[in-house]
Image (tube, helix red, strand yellow):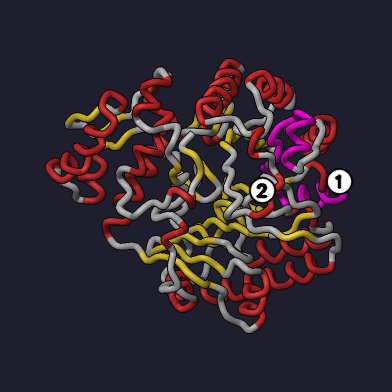
Amino acid sequence: MEPESQLTRLGLFDARVPRYTSYPTAPHFTPSVGAADFAGWVGATAAGSTLSLYIHVPFCRRLCWFCACRTQGTQSDAPVRAYAEVLEQELALLKAALPEGMTLSRLHWGGGTPTLMPPDVMTRLAGAVFSAFPLAPDAEFSVEIDPGEIDEARLDALAAAGMTRASIGVQDFDPEIQAAIGREQGWDLTARAVRMIRARGIASLNADILYGLPHQTSHRIADSIHKLLALSPDRIALYGYAHVPWMAKRQVMIPEGALPGPQERLRLFETARRLLVADGYDEIGIDHFARPGDGLAAAQKAGRLRRNFQGYTDDQARTLIGLGASSISRFPQGYAQNAPATGAYVKAIREGRFATERGHAFCAEDIWRARMIEALMCDFRIDAAEFARDHGLTAERLSALLAPVGAQFGSMVTIDESGLTIPERGRPLTRMIARALDAYAVRASGHSPAI
């Protein structure tokens, strides 16, 4: 890693930049894209193709203070059951609008807490999905699992439905840190959930852990990483906590004075990264790690790694459709987002219309800039031959685009006739380098720290 003085000079510790799970990013979506656009893009999907499906369940029993997702609390199953019925109605609308013969390459249930759905609701929802869109060969079905909100019956329902990957939220195992972020979840509880998942033959386990949390030190994150490694997840996402209380009001509960500073955040990340690599994980992009036999590791080696709203993926489907409140769909033509408010979403679907509230229609430049940013985030490289072949960018045009990047970042990037590469010493700056290729204005207040 490059000395901190050089990273400081380049602004790493002051910058707030997008995570670039989309381009353009969601703050640039507008109401110019609506339900009619969504319906048209759905109808234009090639018959018999595969697509990805994301289903958002916005309910939680507890509202963790660190979380900035669109969620709402409930202690009753009644709103969850009613919401699942609306999801079935949205599935029916989607099936009617899509051409025949569609199959799923990926199905992901996220939230919120999908595992607060009762077992019979899980079974019914999965049945509705697969009756509309069967799984393609080698498809994956993943579910986000809260270890504190799962039991044998619900895991039995998920396993019977065909779940192939479970994703568990860990965040940190230290009790003081857990209390400070409103997520008390002991190691024993997490280990119990993992044992239940493994006992059902689930092929893959993903775990999320955070750095940059209050009271976190290098010693504490190392201890949490060691505990996590004892559970042997196949994939690990090491995300930086984004403290944005002006956007996520519940974060005001987190003691700002206990948050590590930017330089310490980098040291926390490096401590965790080194431990994961030493344990045999491959580094995937900027913040994921995978066992060498995992699909993400294979995709990275083959140059097939991609990035979407769930992070890194080996899914090659051109279309991702999001169902549920606030869900975002990605089509070759652009992005479409459902109404974020659950009430507005439910009203639209019950009236028999799609709930799209905003989005973005791509222009030609959006497409190649999106691919450039994705290539940097996935492979730390922009291949000149790819952009000449697939997007018609001449050597002169690409050189003009990359020259300012070279001027800004100097030895942190390598630019020649083959394109641009970010060497290992410059990889902490990857999101900032991507921002240099972003044609849209980036408001720092809407994004997370660059490290």
Residue 322: quadrant of the picture: bottom right
Q: In the image, what residue occupies the spot 43% across and 68% down?
A: 30
Residue 130: quadrant of the picture: bottom right
- Mark 1–mark 2 Cα distance, whole angstroms, equals 29 Å
Q: Where residue 348 appears, x then y in whole percent?
A: 61, 79
The residue at the far front in this view is: 257
Q: In the image, what residue occupies the spot 66% across and 36% down?
A: 207
Q: Where residue 448 appears, x then y in whole percent?
A: 51, 43
Q: Earlier in the sequence, mark 1 or mark 2?
A: 1
Q: Where residue 37 appears, x then y in whole percent?
A: 43, 74
Task: Name the kind of residue labelled 1 in the image.
Answer: Asp
Work out whether residue 159 can be spotted. yes
Relative placement, left or right, of 170 versus 396 is right
Q: In the image, what residue occupies the spot 71% across and 20% down?
A: 223
Asked whether the beta carbons under mark 1 and mark 2 sit within 8 Å of each other, the answer is no
Relative placement, left or right, of 143 versus 338 is right
Work out whether residue 292 can be spotted. no
For the N terminus, the image quarter is top left
Q: Which residue is mark 1?
A: 151
Residue 396 against residue 354 in the figure, above or below: above
| Part of the protein shown in magenta | 153-181
Which is closer to the viewer, label 1 or label 2? Answer: 2
Q: Where residue 182 appears, x then y in whole percent?
A: 76, 43
Q: Is residue 177 magenta?
A: yes
Q: Which residue is mark 2?
A: 251
Residue 146: quadrant of the picture: top right
Decide which of 40, 170 is in the foreground and name it. Answer: 170
Relative placement, left or right, of 260 versus 229 is left
Task: Name the kind of residue labelled 2 in the image.
Answer: Gln
Residue 420 against residue 442 in the figure, above or below: above
